[in-house]
Image (tube, rainbow, N blue to C red):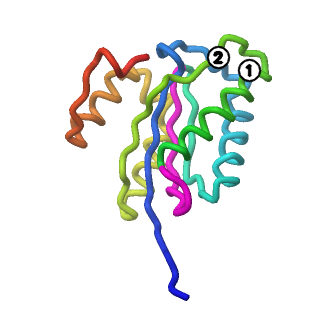
Amino acid sequence: MPQSLAKVYIHIVFSTKYCKPIIKKEIQKDLHAYMVGTIANLKSYTNEIYANTDHVHILCNLPRTITLADFISKIKSSSSKWIKENGVLNFGWQNGYGVFSVSSSKIEIVAKYIRSQEEHHKKKSFKDELRAFFKEYGIDYDERYVWD
């Protein structure tokens, strides 16, 4: 029987609803652990994760057995429920997301970038950060629909 093998690395970025700074430092590490567990249950490995107050970065591999949209939907829905259960009652993620392919030779560079998010956002806003990703990857977008 032939095998189906894949190793596709992705950098996922999505924000809180309307980019509200609602993720508190007190739940950050537990949220990371919860999301890593969810991703593992979906048969993916998380290389790096960081939840800022208003958005999340995840570097992982895309499981071979699930669509990208379903993968991200499961991460967002389960973590949203967890966050609400942990005291953030009006919590919600934005409807959309950004996903960027990552070459296996660039994994450590992207992981380091994610680890440096706290320092990074002292100089650059999330919106400017995402705009830079869109430019780097040649993604056309409409500002009216990005920040929901």
| Residue 30 at x, y percent in the picture | 74, 34
Residue located 37% across and 54% down the image? 102
Q: Of the residues shown, which amino acid type is indicated by label 1?
A: Lys
Magenta highlight on residue 65: yes
Crowd class of label 2 (few under 14; some 14 to 19; many from 20; radius 10 Å): some
Q: Residues within 10 Å of mark 1 (few under 14, many from 20)?
A: few
Q: Residue at x 40, y 23 (%)?
A: 126
Any magenta on residue 112?
A: no
Q: Could you tell me which secondary element the residue under label 2 belongs to?
A: loop
Q: Which mark is residue 91?
A: 2
Up/down of 77 relative to 102, above or below: above
The residue located at (43%, 24%) in the rendering is: 121
Would residue 136 be found to the left or right of residue 21 on screen?
left
Q: Nearer the viewer, residue 3 or 107?
A: 3
Instruction: Say which element carries label 1.
Output: helix
Q: In which quadrant of the rendered image does the C terminus lie?
A: top left
Q: Which residues are magenta?
A: 54-67
Q: Are the residues at dot 1 and dot 2 in contact (C-beta closer than 8 Å)?
A: yes
Looking at the figure, which quarter contains the N terminus? bottom right
Nearer-N-terminus badge (1/2): 1
Residue 51, compared with residue 142, is above or below; it is: below
Instruction: Determine the CA span between mark 1 and mark 2.
Output: 6 Å
Q: Residue at x 53, y 32 (%)?
A: 56
Residue 18 vs residue 106: left or right?
Answer: right
Q: Position of residue 101 (x, y in %)?
A: 36, 52
Q: Kindly identify which residue carries mark 1.
A: 84
Amino acid type assigned to the residue bearing label 2 in the image:
Phe
Question: Residue 106 location, x and y as percent?
Answer: 37, 58
Of 52 and 8, nearer the camera is 8
Name above or below for residue 104 compared with residue 126.
Answer: below
Q: Looking at this view, is 54 or 108 the one in front?
A: 54
